[in-house]
Amino acid sequence: MSDAKLVYKDKEYPLPVVEGSEGEVAVDVSKLRAQSGLITLDPGYGNTGACQSSICFIDGDEGILRYRGYPIEQIATRARFTEVCYLLIYGKRPNAEELREFRVKLTRHTLIHEDMKKFYEGYPPGAHPMAIMAAMIASLSTFYPDTEESLDLNIIRMLAKVKTLAAFAYKKSVGQPFIYPRNDLSWTGNFLHMMFAVPSEEYVVNPVMEEALNLLLILHADHEQNCSTSTVRMVGSSDANLFASISGGICALWGPRHGGANQSVIEMLDAIQADGGNYRAFLDQVKDGNSKVRLMGFGHRVYKNFDPRAKLLKDAADRIFAQLGAVDPLLELAKRIEEEALRDEYFVKRKLYPNVDFYSGVIYRAMGIPTEMFTVMFVLGRLPGWIAHWMEQRNSDDNRIHRPRQIYTGENLREFEDLGTKHLSTKLGKGR
Ligand code: CMC
């Protein structure tokens, strides 16, 4: 492929062009500064490829999403979440025996160390479960060594224990005793059991809930270089251990512009409903340039046509509601808002469509999962993607520490004058 050229101050700099397997092209600027003194400036990295990756492919204009080459529409209806974990992390589909072994390992490592249960006691009752998750995942590194030999097992531990940690965070928030995992249940069934069982009753996993959860987790499993995955790669680039890197990803996911949007969508719908359901007035606020109010669950950096995950979830929502016998005015409200927004010039012009978070929350609600746990559900789904990216980077030939540059806009050199305050007492005076 021929080089691109940059002309600066009458000098020409050739820039190698890199082409991906789906025909995406990029100019390689990694040597540009050494050759010309120039760096590239791209706030928010909207036009920057941070790596080459073979895990996930998105074509935002066409609404295409593929994991390791397989279309999301097929994976969503034909796979179980654990198979998707395997596919993303190890780069190939497991055969029946490999999948069985993988599932056995994931089941055997679901318990957490008993000492970790004590950590939950320290949190105040209203603690957000995302804060607990980030801390608990980082804390796993205090129990399991960060060695080359333990890496495979640490990946299994992480995938197995994350659901226990999440369910315990929920149990803590409602003041109920922790429910231990059962080895006869699937990954998803075990999570539902640890969430909803109580010691005084036998809990039978509802297959509709299990199916719904399977779909939701698969749809969240990877999404190439999004904010949290880039964070995991960024933290991992310093050779930080797997648990620490994933903990960083959890913090990045929490924000309402990213995974936290699923919680914000329900809070927004609730507020509109409580205000008499006048969604048109709400959309007017969104469109008012000065209001800073956003239609949560809408818009995406990459998708400019539709988000295939949102489409699958919208279709699934009616089915899941019917199967669970659930009724929720917020589902109808969400549909009316989508309809209205999709024919409104403001949203059409900016190519704003519902994203994965627009319908996931109403489904989680129908399943009895509380709003504050929604982003934790996103963590459960995204974990295999994070691990896959962390591994890919670690094994890549250009695994350099992530260290962007900047254009400095601060003060020029100035004198730090001695104000004679060096020995000022820090003792507070009377009356202060
Ligand atoms: N409601 C109203 N206006 C919007 C919205 C929205 N949800 N999203 C973008 N815009 C407008 C924005 O005001 C801007 O308009 P203008 O050109 O007049 O200034 C234009 O669209 C472009 O927006 P942007 O902020 O430059 O786009 P971005 O690519 O930087 O941000 C986003 C992407 C997802 C952060 C943003 O669309 C947003 O805040 N959406 C709401 C939060 C949300 O649903 N997040 C979940 C994302 S999908 C799941 C995930 O990966 O986490």
Image (cartoon, rainbow, N blue to C red):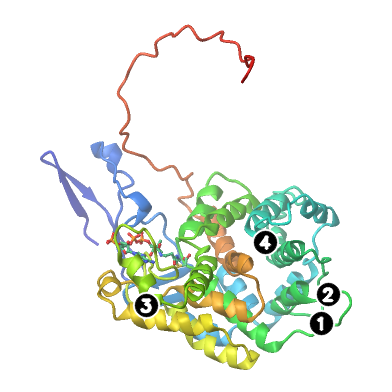
Whether label 3 touches label 2, CB < 8 Å = no
Q: According to the image, label 3 marks what residue?
A: 306
Sequence-first tag of 2 and 1: 2
Could you say which quadrant of the image residue 39 lies in?
top left
Point out the frontmost of discs 1 and 3.
1
The answer to whether residue 68 of the structure is visible from this angle is: no
Task: Determine which of the numbered discs, if any, sits on residue 203 in the image.
Answer: 1
Note whether ligand 1 is within 8 Å of mark 2: no
Viewer-nearest residue: 267 or 365: 267
| Helix, strand or loop under label 1 | loop
Look at label 2 and name its amino acid: Val
Residue 291 position in % (x across, y down): 35, 59
Sequence-first tag of 3 and 4: 4
Residue visible at 47% across and 57% down?
A: 227
Look at label 1 and name its amino acid: Tyr
Whether label 2 touches label 1, CB < 8 Å = yes
Q: Is residue 355 left or right of 203 when viewed as pictured?
A: left
Q: Is residue 115 left or right of 47 when viewed as pictured?
A: right
- In this view, which residue lies farthest toward the right? 200
Point out the frontmost of discs 3 and 2.
2
Residue 218 position in % (x across, y down): 56, 76
Point out the frontmost of discs 3 and 4.
3
Alpha-carbon distance for marks 3 and 4?
33 Å
| Helix, strand or loop under label 2 | loop
Whether label 1 touches label 4, CB < 8 Å = no
| Helix, strand or loop under label 3 | loop
Note whether ligand 1 is within 8 Å of mark 1: no
